[in-house]
Image: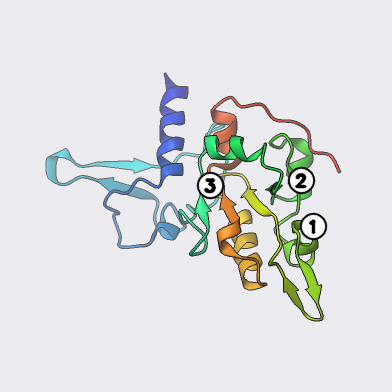
Amino acid sequence: MKYINILFFAVLISMNIHATPLTKTSSLGLFSKTQKSYKVGEGKEAFVIKRSLTSCAKNKGYFQPFSPVKGVKTITESELLYSLNDKEALLVDMRIEEQFLEETIPTAINIPYTEVELRLDELGCVKDTDKWNCSKAFKVYAFCNGPVCAQSPIAIKDMVRMGFPAEKIFYYRGGMLVWDALGLNTVKGEF
């Protein structure tokens, strides 16, 4: 039963369900250094959700926005699975190399968030002097550790800033946390 409750909470987080915060902050402020709990409801019916970092809630960090950049589509596991058969798409694990090598989603390539600006050519962009031309870029399905991981949101922001079209980026916000919680298989990353 505890596992089902944790899975339900992870799905709610990945769906970005809203309630009333104890302090007026954006979704980036939830469960941050200053906000340790979240109030749901009013009066006698109110209750407080607190975050405990257990072995199941292994991801540290702060809630990431539902979409890191305007124009980027946030996707579900089903949409990610369908993308695996799309010849014009790349599944990109944007976590650091050590995490990728430990386990990743099958077919994923690794472009760590710290390297994406230098490796846009692997995503179908062409360097024109000092600018990237991404008009013929692949569709990129990006993920990291889950709803509290900032690695893929940082990389996505950098990609768009460098000229990658936002509408060709699909953000799997659930990441490895939700993928694992749903019991979907993983593989060891390879180069």
| Residue highlighted by disc 1 | 122
Which residue is outermost to the bottom?
A: 129
Q: Amino acid at mark 3?
A: Arg
The quarter of the picture where residue 15 lies is: top left
Residue 115 relative to residue 161: left or right: right
Q: Secondary structure at mark 2?
A: strand
Q: Residues within 10 Å of mark 3 (few under 14, many from 20)?
A: many
Using the image as rendered, state which of residue 166 and residue 15 is in the foreground: 166
Q: Are marks 1 and 2 in contact (CB under 8 Å)?
A: yes
C-alpha span from label 2 to label 3: 17 Å
Query: Along the horizontal axis of the image, is 57 left or right of 9?
Result: right
Q: Are marks 2 and 3 in contact (CB under 8 Å)?
A: no
Percent position of residue 156, x then y: 61, 61
Q: Is residue 129 left or right of residue 155?
A: right
**For mark 2, does the 10 Å Cα neighbourhood hold few (<14), some (14 to 19), or many (20 or more) residues?**
some
Location of mark 3 (residue):
173
Tell me which label, 1 or 2, sits earlier in the chain: 2
Whether the residues at callouts 3 and 1 have beta carbons within 8 Å, the answer is no
In this view of the protein, can residue 181 be seen by the observer?
A: yes
Residue 53 or residue 11, whichever sits in front: 11
Coloring scheme used: rainbow
Specify few, some or many for label 1: CA neighbours under 10 Å numbering under 14, 14-19, or 20 or more: some
Q: Residue at x 55, y 60 (%)?
A: 167
Q: Of helix, strand and loop, which one carries label 1?
A: helix
Instruction: Locate the N terminus by quadrant.
Output: top left
Mark positioned earlier in the residue sequence (2 or 3)? 2
Q: Is residue 3 above or below residue 123?
A: above
Q: Out of 103 and 77, give the one closest to the viewer.
A: 77
What residue does disc 2 label? Answer: 109
Residue 112: x, y in percent? 74, 55
* Secondary structure of the residue carrying numbered label 3: loop
